[in-house]
Each structure stands twice: as structure tokens, then as C-alpha cells.
Amino acid sequence: MKSKVMFKSFCFEITRKCNMKCLHCMRGEAQDLTISKQVIDECLDNIAGIYNFILTGGEPFLEPDMIEYLFDEIIRREIAVYGFSCMTNGSIRNEQIIKAWNRLADYIAARYKPTEDAEADRKYLRAIGQIIVSYDRYHQLDCDPLDTVKWYRQRMNNHCIALRENLKENETIHALGRVVENDNIMRNGKIDYVVCPHRILLLKDTNMVETGVQVGCNGIITHAKDSSFEQQDKKNFGNILTEPLFDIMQRGMRVEPFTEEEAAVYDRVYTEMRTGKIDLKQGNELLTYFDSVYTARKVCQKIYPWMTFEEMVEAVYDDMNIRLRKTEDSPYIFTLYPLEEYKVTREESIKRTQTTKIKALLTDPLSYFSNLSSLEASIEETPLKIWDGFKRCE
């Protein structure tokens, strides 16, 4: 029997088709791919509920039939949903989409149980379903996006809203997809880099996934952070068409050794180095240290497969504390997130490491001996450089 999963945030990639070629598109070139009913069914069969789900693309509104099918299947299966939204380029006005939007919002509102805060209830019920029309200097619409917003507003029920979202002056553009091919944006725009993957956070007691997750239109499961089609295809946790979602989520907890917060720190340092905000040498030193931690955790997972993630993190910091701090008076190593000193004495790290080794010998001696030699080599040589997976960002 399948274990169903709850999600705080889940994205459905409706299609990779698009009717525009925006210069700042992080996805890359459009592709002739659209989500199938089979992918939708396999996902919904595995989902117990979603607090907020998002339609993404490509341009999602190019496929109203699939949107309608997705919404109708959620209602038919009586899946608990608390809100939904979609960012659209504003070029499509479709009655079928409006009817689906109103129908799903009514379904969610009917299931909602009022709280003691009447004003909060009113605000929530007024914005269950959202359509957000994206518009900025890089779009080349033939129509006024405000007219599209008004068109949807006139047809929406009282549980839905339509908004226009602008790219604000202080916002950055991801150096992904089509952006990296545009010299003007890369030179003159405010850009940032998204290069570091992260693990899925699944609370086993409740089967709640705390990190955002996306199903691609081809069935691949990735985290829902901003990314290009290329990144999604290279870095994913599995495919819903070949295995249950719960199994994919469990793999997602293991295959990447950084948390979402740690990955964000890595991306920030990488961005500051590439954009000249920090010294190149300093940036490289920081990233090399991050790569050492990343690689050591990967190896540690092999040596100590029985460890929890928290134990593995501490074991790696203890190992590096011993290697990098030759005496107790040596400067502290620092943690990735938050960037602060790891204030554990070298002596305490030695004691904990010895205890861990004894436990490993008793728990899984074969795994311990077969992988032990790789830990030393991996930390010192750092064969894994996180950004190497995305050469187009170099």
C-alpha cells in the first residue's frame, strides 16, 4: 500500500511550451512537452494534501484542458487543499480556466472550518485561488497586462483574485536559462546564481514535506526552487511514473547533503564572487570549504548509513574540527548555516569521533571498512565542486 504524503508547497509543471521568448526567462528555450493525465493521476494517488499548490511552466495557460483535469481530479478525490496560484504572462484569456479556477476555489472554501479570527478568515476566503499576471520591462505583450487582470477579475468568484506583479527595480534576475545567453542582462542587470541543490525535508511522523517540491510535466520530481529546464533534468530525485512519491521523498532526504538554508548561503557566496562583491580569492576559499563539507557529508553517508542527518552533520564538523584545528588554540571552523563558529573543543570532537567509530564497527563493519579510506581523500582533494553540474553558469 502506498504511503501518502502531505506537502506545504507542491508545484505542477503543466507544460514547457510557451508563446513568448522573454529575455529574462530562467527556464531556457521552450520545449514541446505537456503534463499527461497519467503523471497527474500518479501524483494525486500519492498525495494526502497540499497547503499551497502552484501551476508553473512554460506558460501554463496554454493547456486549459490539463488544468481543468487536474482541478477536477483533486475535487473528485477529495484531496485537502488550502490555496492555489499561477503566474502567467498575461497573453491568454480563457473561459475554461476561469470556470476551473472558480470551481476549485468553491470546493476549498466549502471545506474550510472557520477560526476565532473572523478577519483572518475573511482575508483567506477572499484569496484562495490567485492568478498573477507577470509584467516587466523584458516582456513584449501586444496587450496591456492590466486589461488581462481586469478580464479575469470580472469573471472570478469571491474566493479568487487576479493581480499584476512587476519585476521591482531592486529585484535580481536568475542567471539561468535564456539569461546566460544575453550579454546585456549579464553585464548590466542585477543577477544572481542558483547552483546549489538541497535535500528534501520530510517529517516522518506526519509524512509532511516541509520543502517545496515540483513534478515536471515528464514526471520527474525536483525541489521547487527556481531552476532551468536543464537543471531539473540533471538534478532530480526520481520519476513518479516509475516509483511511489513517498519513496522518492525518502531518497530526496538522502541524496543531497545540504539543507535549503545551507544551499542558499552557497548561492549567495557564489553570486557575490561572480558579481565582484567579494574578492575572488576569498570567494574561492569559501566555496572550496563549502565543497569540502558537501563532499565529506556525501562520503559520511556511505560510511555511516545508519546515521540521522543531524548526526551526520555533526560527525563531519567534528572530523573537520580535528583536521583543520591542529591545537585547541587554533581558529574555530565555521558552520555553513548559520555562518558561525563551531564552538566545540578539538578534544570533544576527538572523543565523539572515537565513539562514532566504535558504534560503526558494531553496527555496520562492512560499510565502515569499505568506505573509510575515501573520507580522507575526499575532504583533502575535494573532487566534487557543486557548480560543475551547471557549466552554462560558468
Image (tube, grey):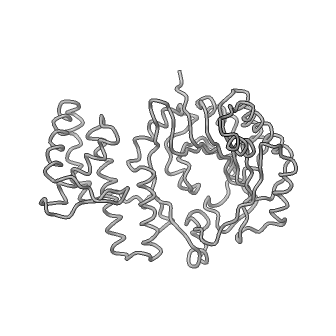
Residue farthest top in this picture: 1
Q: Residue at x 26, y 49 (%)?
A: 316
Q: Residue at x 23, y 49 (%)?
A: 375
Q: Is residue 220 left or right of residue 292?
A: right
Q: Is residue 383 left or right of residue 111?
A: left
Q: Position of residue 111 (x, y in %)?
A: 71, 30
Q: Residue at x 75, y 45 (%)?
A: 126
Q: Position of residue 354 (x, y in %)?
A: 14, 42
Q: From the viewer's perspective, is residue 39 above or below residue 279?
A: above
- Count the labels in the image: 0
Q: Is residue 190 left or right of residue 273?
A: right
Q: Is residue 335 left or right of residue 346?
A: right
Q: Residue at x 66, y 66 (%)?
A: 167
Foreground pick, 353 / 43? 353
Q: From the viewer's perspective, is residue 347 above or below residue 117?
A: below
Occupied quadrant, residue 274: bottom left
Q: Position of residue 153 (x, y in %)?
A: 83, 52
Q: From the viewer's perspective, is residue 58 above or below residue 282?
A: above
Foreground pick, 85 / 138? 85
Occupied quadrant, residue 79: top right
Foreground pick, 82 / 16? 82
Q: Position of residue 164 (x, y in %)?
A: 75, 60
